Image (spheres, helix red, strand yellow):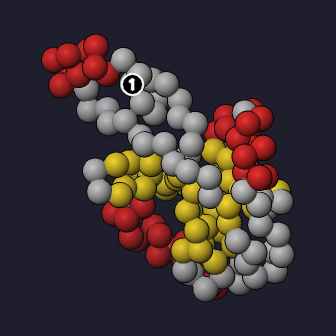
């Protein structure tokens, strides 16, 4: 993987204008793949995610971050905060699962994405490798 790693503000499914720009860029430039970071929402759960967009502009895969940052992506003491949590607009992210991206286009290898400091956690790399990842893309 090479080049800038774009990140979108807000929730991916609500950011249609920016998503369409990225899809159009992938098609217009003939890029093999674009990996973009954004918040994903599934029902009432939010995920810190990386989306893989192919040269045809279609979403080819999604990785939801597994190892969340305490106090940055979730509040570990939420039950102890009681009524004061009402004052916070902070919603916890939900942890994802191991996702490897399949062999696509000119890239003939399967790969995993690591978000933020996940690349420092050896067990994540080992488990991705066991799941079939042949290389990694670090996403900040």
The residue under the point 32% across, 32% down is: 90
Q: Name the residue under label 1.
A: 75
Give x and y (percent) for residue 28: 64, 85
Q: In the rendered view, does 46 fall on the left or right side of 98?
A: left
Quarter of the image with the C terminus in it: top right
| Residue 134 picture location, percent across and down | 83, 60
Residue shown at 75%/82% (left/top)? 105
Tally of numbered tags: 1
Quadrant where the N terminus sits is bottom right
- Reply above or below: 74 against 5: above
What residue is shown at x 82% (from left), y 57% (from top)? 135
Q: In which quarter of the image is residue 132?
A: bottom right
* Residue 101 visible, this orientation: yes
Q: Residue furthest top?
A: 80
- Residue drawn where x is 61% and y is 86% of the image: 56
Which is nearer the eye, 53 or 47?
47
Image side of residue 134 versus residue 55, left or right: right
* Residue 136 seen from this side: no
As rendered, which of 54 and 95 lies closer to the eye? Answer: 95
Badge 1 marks a residue whose secondary structure is: loop
Give percent across and percent down for residue 34. Answer: 65, 68
Quadrant of the image occupied by residue 119:
top right
Residue 63: x and y, percent? 57, 56
């Amino acid at each position: 993987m090479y080049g800038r790693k774009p990140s979108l503000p807000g929730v991916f499914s609500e950011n249609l204008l920016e998503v369409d720009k990225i899809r159009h860029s992938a098609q217009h430039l003939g890029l093999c793949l674009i990996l973009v970071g954004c918040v994903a929402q599934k029902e009432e759960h939010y995920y810190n995610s990386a989306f893989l967009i192919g040269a045809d502009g279609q979403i080819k895969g999604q990785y939801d971050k597994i190892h969340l940052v305490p106090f940055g992506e979730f509040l570990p003491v939420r039950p102890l905060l009681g009524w004061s949590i009402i004052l916070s607009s902070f919603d916890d992210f939900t942890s994802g699962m191991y996702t490897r991206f399949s062999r696509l286009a000119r890239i003939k290898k399967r790969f995993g994405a690591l978000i933020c400091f996940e690349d420092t956690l050896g067990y994540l790399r080992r488990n991705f490798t066991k799941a079939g990842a042949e290389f990694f893309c670090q996403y900040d």
